[in-house]
């Protein structure tokens, strides 16, 4: 990375940290620039506004989602493998990917403050995955007991089950206010045997619905 890319990366990573700990609504450019010891003018060299910065973070998440769906398309050989790969994927996230997931969990409680462009991007993060699950179900339509007319409902249900479960896992319920667990706390919980049991339960439950 050159100097400009290094500085831009530093801004984005600190913004992610602050979204996780403080929430997007409480993220201020003044505090962010102070944390990484740059001027506000330096910030505006890379991003014209806080909204533009968030847009870049959402773009990164969308790109990660597209890469994931491509892998899901090319690796599994049948529907069971697709479901296993999809649901188990949380155990194989890199630190950067997991950090971005925590950002998205926090953003879900702040989307009312997004501008129109970012709200559309935010919706697309879900729509890309739902559309892809729908394509997978249609590909294996002869192997499942779901009627064609219910494929989209089923895709939304599968997406929602995994998303809500992970969101609940990432929230710190011991805190007196809404709080996301730290990256290290989440990494530890994801390695816990209970997490694998939870995911196995989800996989079995989804397969019962499909078959």
Image: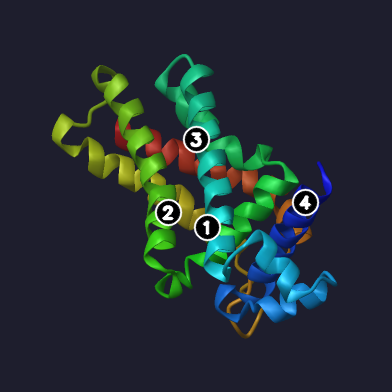
Question: Which residue in the rendered view is the most extreme toward the top?
Answer: 77
Q: Is residue 59 above or below residue 169?
A: above
| Image coordinates for residue 185, horizontal then vertical, percent | 75, 60
Crowd rating for badge 3 (residues with CA inside 10 Å; few <14, some 14–19, many 20+):
some
Q: Which mark is residue 4?
A: 4
Q: Is residue 5 above or below residue 16?
A: above
The alpha-carbon separation of the residues under discs 1 and 3 comes to 16 Å
The foreground one among 75 and 55 is 55
Q: Is residue 151 left or right of residue 14?
A: left
- Which residue is labeled 1 in the image? 55
Q: Helix, strand, or loop for circle 4? A: helix
Q: Helix, strand, or loop for circle 1? A: helix
Which quadrant of the structure image shows residue 36? bottom right
- Which residue is labeled 2 in the image? 121
Q: Is residue 119 left or right of residue 148?
A: right
The alpha-carbon separation of the residues under discs 1 and 2 comes to 8 Å
The alpha-carbon separation of the residues under discs 1 and 4 comes to 18 Å
Q: Dots 1 and 2: beta carbons under 8 Å?
A: yes
Q: In the image, which is nearer the foreground, mark 4 or mark 2?
A: 4
Please give the name of the residue rendered at 74% of the width and 47% of the height, measured from the top-left corner: 95
Which quadrant of the structure image shows residue 145? top left
Quadrant holding the C terminus: top left
Q: Dots 3 and 2: beta carbons under 8 Å?
A: no
């Amino acid at each position: 990375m050159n100097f400009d890319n290094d500085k831009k990366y530093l801004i984005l990573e600190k913004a992610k940290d602050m979204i996780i700990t403080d929430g997007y609504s409480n993220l201020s450019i003044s505090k962010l620039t102070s944390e990484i010891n740059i001027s506000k003018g330096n910030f505006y060299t890379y991003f014209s506004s806080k909204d533009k910065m968030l847009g870049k973070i959402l773009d990164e998440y969308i790109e990660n989602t597209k890469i994931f769906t491509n892998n899901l398309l090319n690796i599994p050989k049948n529907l069971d493998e697709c479901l296993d790969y999809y649901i188990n994927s949380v155990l194989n996230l890199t630190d950067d990917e997991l950090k971005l997931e925590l950002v998205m969990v926090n953003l879900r409680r702040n989307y009312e403050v997004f501008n129109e462009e970012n709200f559309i991007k935010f919706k697309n993060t879900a729509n890309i995955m739902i559309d892809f699950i729908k394509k997978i179900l249609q590909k294996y339509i002869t192997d499942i007991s779901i009627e064609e007319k219910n494929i989209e409902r089923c895709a939304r249900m599968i997406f929602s089950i995994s998303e809500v479960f992970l969101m609940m896992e990432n929230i710190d319920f011991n805190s007196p206010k809404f709080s996301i667990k730290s990256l290290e706390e989440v990494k530890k919980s994801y390695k816990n045997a209970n997490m694998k049991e939870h995911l196995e339960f989800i996989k079995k439950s989804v397969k019962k619905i499909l078959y």
